[in-house]
Amino acid sequence: MHGYIHSIETMALHDGPGIRFAVFFQGCGLRCIYCHNPDTWQFSKENTVSAEDLYAKTLRYRSYMENSSGGVTCTGGEPLMQPEFLLKYLRLCRDGGLHTAIDTSGVGLGAYEEILEVTDLVLLDVKAVSADGFQQLTGVPMAKAEPFYRALANSGTSVRIRHVLVPGVNDSDENIEKLQKFIQRFPAVEQVELLAYHTLGVSKYEHMKRPYPFEGVEPLSKERLKYFQSFFD
C-alpha cells in the first residue's frame, strides 16, 4: 500500500507540541474559500510512498522529536482522505514510541475510531459552527464532518481547536460565542487557537490560474485576533 504525499517538513514548530515531523497528505474533499494549500487538493502519483518507507524516513529525525517532546503530525490536504495508509503509518509511529497527531477538518473517508486509537492529539480545524456557514465556506454539508465529530467526542483523545477568523465573515462576538458552545461537545479540549486569515496562498492561486475568492479582503489585524482570543484565555 502506498500513500499520496504532497511534501514533508522535518522541523515543524506550529503543528503540535515540540518539534514535529509534519507529513502533508494529498487530497481534500473540501474547497475552502480561503485555502492556502490548493495545490494539495488533488491526488497525484508523482509522489507516492509506502508507510514503511515513510516511517523509516521519520526515524532519521527521532532525536529532534524526543529532545523537544515533539512527534509526528499528519496534515494536508486532508489525512483522513487516505484512512488505510494513515492508519498504517500512525500504528508504526505509535508502536515506535513516537507522539502522534493529525491535523484535520474531520471530513474524510472513515475508519475514524481505529485512527483515533493510535492518535495522541487531534488538531481539529473547525471550519464553521453553523450548517449554513460550513456549506458556504467549504462547499460541502457540515453533516460530512459529523461522523468524525462523534468518534472524536467518544474517544477522549486530546484536542486542540483551530478556527480561522476572516474579516467580514466570522470575526464577530456572536461567532465566537457559538464556537465556545460548539466545542463543549469534545471532553478533552486542551487549547483553542484562533488563526488570523492571511493572503499567503494568493500566489498559489495565480500559479494554478484559479480565481482567488477573497480578492481584496485584508488580513485580520493582530489587535482583533488578540481580542477574540481573550474569550478563551
Image: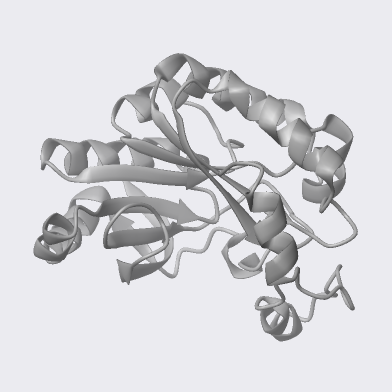
Q: Quadrant of the C terminus?
A: top right
Q: Is residue 71 left or right of residue 42?
A: left
Assign the N terminus to one quadrant of the image.
top left
Q: On the picture, is 178 further left or further right than 9?
A: right
Q: Residue furthest top?
A: 154
Residue 61, percent across and down?
Answer: 15, 65
Protein image colouring: one colour
205 over 65 or under it: above or below: below
Q: Nearer the viewer, residue 161 or 104?
A: 161
Q: Position of residue 210 (x, y in %)?
A: 80, 75
Residue at the (18%, 63%) spot, across then down: 57
Q: How many marks?
A: 0
Vertical placement of residue 35 versus 31, above or below: below
Instruction: Report whether 71 appears left or right of 27.
Output: left
> Which residue is at 61% across, 37% downward?
107
Which of the 4 image quadrants contains residue 132? top right
Which of the 4 image quarters holds residue 8? bottom left
Whether residue 122 is visible to the viewer of this picture, yes or no, is: yes
Residue 147 visible in the shown view: no
Q: Position of residue 41 (x, y in %)?
A: 62, 59
Whole-percent x, y for residue 9 in the image: 35, 70
Q: Nearer the viewer, residue 115 or 42?
A: 115
In-image side of 212 versus 100 (left or right): right
